[in-house]
Amino acid sequence: MAGRLLEEDPELAYEHTLAASRRGGRVAVVREAVGIAAYHAGKYADALRELRTHRRISGSDYNLPLIADSLRALGRPEKAIELAHSEESANLEAAVKVEMQIVAAGAFGDLGKLDEALAELESLEQLNFNRAFSFSPRLFTAYADLLSAAGRPEDAKRWNEQVEVAERALGIEQETESFIMDLAPEMDEEEEAPRAKDLIDPVEDETEVEDEVSDQDDDETAAAEEAATGIDEEDGLSEVAESGTEGEPAESEDESSK
């Protein structure tokens, strides 16, 4: 039920997942469902708490992009970047890694660091003008938006036009988990201006993401306290009234923020 309501009525979907959590709050998939529904409903502090709890219970890093984007939406872009550059994120599977770097690029953009934002996406081999992965429309859109913000409207226009090409190409094929479509295999990409990643020096991470792993008993106690208070102990964040702030979501290409 909650899954069907996510796009149609995210607030109602969140209420459904909360009801499920009262009966199965110690089940990882339930906490994940609550976190994802909270994220779509714009309740980012709740999403952060629930997705971290799911990660502690399950050991899965699959939702790290949503955790990072929740941090970004709560005004913590530096923490989002730190998580994106962590060892855990380095080991993500390709599609999830792309989503994480889209979040990191958005966080750099929030800080006004457009060269670093562009470099974040340009470091991805999947940012290929003539090839479409299942997530390419979203990646191309994020890159075009940054090019536009950086004062490169012609480049932005080319990539925006390629979003539609990629969508058409992907739409005529049966979708699989890892398919790739050549958009113009006989053509090389036109020469472009130097990429931002070639103009800045790589910076080694100076900090590591805080260890989020705890004993099961401690996790259950913390989860119960968080559910009662709405306080996220790791960041000292509490849920606030719904705002218009939107993070750069880690979603499939057919969602509205691609």
Image (tube, grey):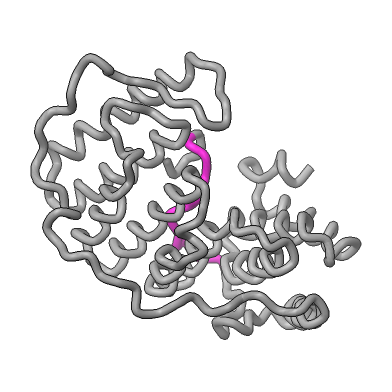
Quarter of the rendering occupied by the C terminus: top left
**What is the tally of numbered marks visible in this picture?**
0
**Residue 54 percent across, percent down from the top left:** 70, 63
- Which residue is at a point 33% across and 22% down the rendered structure image? 165
Residue 247: in magenta span: yes
- Which residue is at a point 48% across and 52% down the rendered structure image? 249
In the foreground, 119 or 236: 119
- Which residue is at a point 49% across and 43% down the rendered structure image? 95
**Residue 128 percent across, percent down from the top left:** 29, 34
Which quadrant would residue 110 be assigned to in this image? bottom left
Query: In this picture, is 176 found above or below 64?
Result: above
Which quadrant would residue 17 be assigned to in this image? bottom right
Query: In this picture, is 74 found above or below 163?
Result: below
Give left or right: position of 24 versus 163: right
Residue 1: in magenta span: no
**Residue 78 percent across, percent down from the top left:** 38, 74
- Which residue is at a point 62% across and 64% down the rendered structure image? 47
Magenta span dominant secondary structure: loop
Quarter of the rendering occupied by the N terminus: top right
Magenta segment, which residues?
242-253
In the foreground, 95 or 31: 95
**Residue 190 percent across, percent down from the top left:** 13, 28
Give left or right: position of 165 versus 225: left
